[in-house]
Amino acid sequence: MPIRFMSAEEAAAYCGMDLEQFSRLVQPNIPLISIPSPAADTVPATRYDRHDIDAWCDGFKAAQSTKKPTKTAPGHTAPPKNTARERGLVKRGDIWHINKIYRGIPIRKSTHQTDRGEAERVLIQHLAAIDQGKDFGLRPKHHWKEAAAKYLAENQAMPSIQDAAMHLEALEPYIGHLPLEQIHDHTLQKFIAERKKRGKNVQAANGVSARTINMALELVGRILRKAAFKWRDELGLTWLDKCPAISKLKEENERRPPYPMSWEEQRLLLKALPYHLAIMALFKVNTGTREKEVCNLRWEWEVPIPELNTSVFLIPAKFGGRTPSSGVKNGKDRLVVLNAVARHVVDTQRGQDQVYVFAYSGKGHPAGIKNCLDRMNGHAWRKARNRAAEQYQEEHGRPANAGFAELRVHDLKHTFGHRLRVAGVPFEDRQSLLGHTSKSVTTHYSAPEIGRLIAMAERAQETDARQVAAPTILRR
């Protein structure tokens, strides 16, 4: 049986012509195929497909048998027309699409080309890939850009899909053009180096943290594993033969430990904060809520408990937050019980706004319209903690602890958890009050259970009669 892909000399001999006749009659009407070599440094060979030659010959013979004899110059017989539909191309709007069954494998996809010649080249590449897979077991090449798009399409319902899209956008300039086989630690080095130098927003202008880079690297590893073990092409072959191990950066040197405040530090911080942040911080340090939960807290989430003459907040699992589909971190409704301080904060906010408990109408918000803050950790927070640290040094004659000078909003939650532990609150109750996931913690509470949690939350107060003295925090 003749070989499948032929050089010009072999194709001319196959047609029974000399090279000059082949170049004049056949060559202009069949595509020249570039066959990639398995070796990356080898120049692809150019060949003619025997199937294309056979199709031309059959068409030429049919045209000759039905054509009326005419006086034409010798050697100038026109070849048969090779229509796009015969090739397996269909034009939809301005774009050519492939609709063809080749060697038993259906190919139905867009070429993303408006020019027919370019579309035919895309089709030929698909046919060559099928031949390589069928005849030699070689995988068609899949690029990172294709894999990233497939991952996003498959995970639209994932709560963190917006974060994944952000990381994929950052990776695109560095590996988007690469085949999956070429993505490994070495090809990711430029991405890592650039991200260490600069980020995409004001906060990360001087580079992002190792944790942020590692989240992108974890996503690369996840997609490569899917390509190696799950995703398969038309031939039943996985997109990737072997999945490389993607190394991650060390985070220990950058990770800041939690910093629970002392009562003195809390006093100085609340005094330095502007009023709208001070009441949010006071609520947070007495409820253990997360930043987005406080910023988005709504009156419609308040649930009265008549038996206890109080109320609680039940935050929906997907209340929004950073993205419309995000919400409570553990994916479950979040019960927020109020001790005396938190209840007082809520009562002072009643009537301020019909929607949000902590509404705000300051800088960056339309005049006369109140809505919620996007975050507490902004310019005002950072200036306030600096003033609080300076006041601490002025009052005590020594510099404030570095953790207090760089206090994060999330440290308010750690402060609440630390005070619960010091006050002897049992572990399971601390889990419930902090909104942590636990197999032993239920999401359904009776009035007596809520009463018990409120009593436990009261222990976090400095003025609680059972707490003889404020807890001492030992630090270097």
Image (cartoon, rainbow, N blue to C red):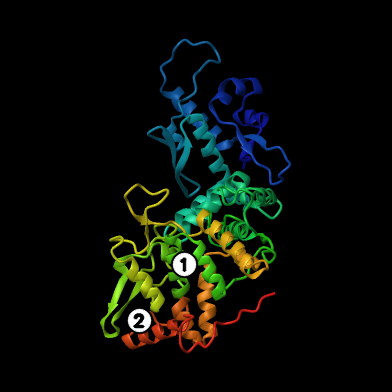
Residue holding disc 1: 281
- Label 2 crowd bin: few (<14), some (14–19), many (20+), radius 10 Å: few
The percent coordinates of residue 347 (x first, y second) are 33, 71
- Residue 9 versus residue 334: which sits nearer the camera? 334
Of discs 1 and 2, which sits in the foreground?
A: 1
Residue at image position (30%, 84%) is: 308
User: Considering only order in the chain, which callout, 2 or 1, is on the residue closer to the N terminus?
Assistant: 1
In the picture, measured across the screen, residue 191 lies left or right of residue 418, that is right
Amino acid type assigned to the residue bearing label 2 in the image: His
- The tag on residue 444 is 2
Q: Are marks 1 and 2 in contact (CB under 8 Å)?
A: no
- Residue 162 versus residue 347: which sits nearer the camera? 347
In the picture, measured across the screen, residue 90 lies left or right of residue 176, that is left
Quarter holding the N terminus is: top right
Helix, strand or loop under label 2: loop
Is there any visible trace of residue 179 in the rendered image?
A: yes
- Residue 23 versus residue 303: which sits nearer the camera? 303
Residue furthest toward the right? 41
Residue furthest toward the left? 306
Is there any visible trace of residue 406 in the rendered image?
A: no
Number of marks in the rendered image: 2
In the picture, measured across the screen, residue 68 lies left or right of residue 208, that is left
The percent coordinates of residue 228 (x first, y second) are 59, 59
The percent coordinates of residue 172 (x first, y second) are 58, 46
Residue at image position (47%, 80%) is: 461
Residue at image position (68%, 43%) is: 37
Amino acid type assigned to the residue bearing label 1 in the image: Ala
Helix, strand or loop under label 1: helix
- The tag on residue 302 is none
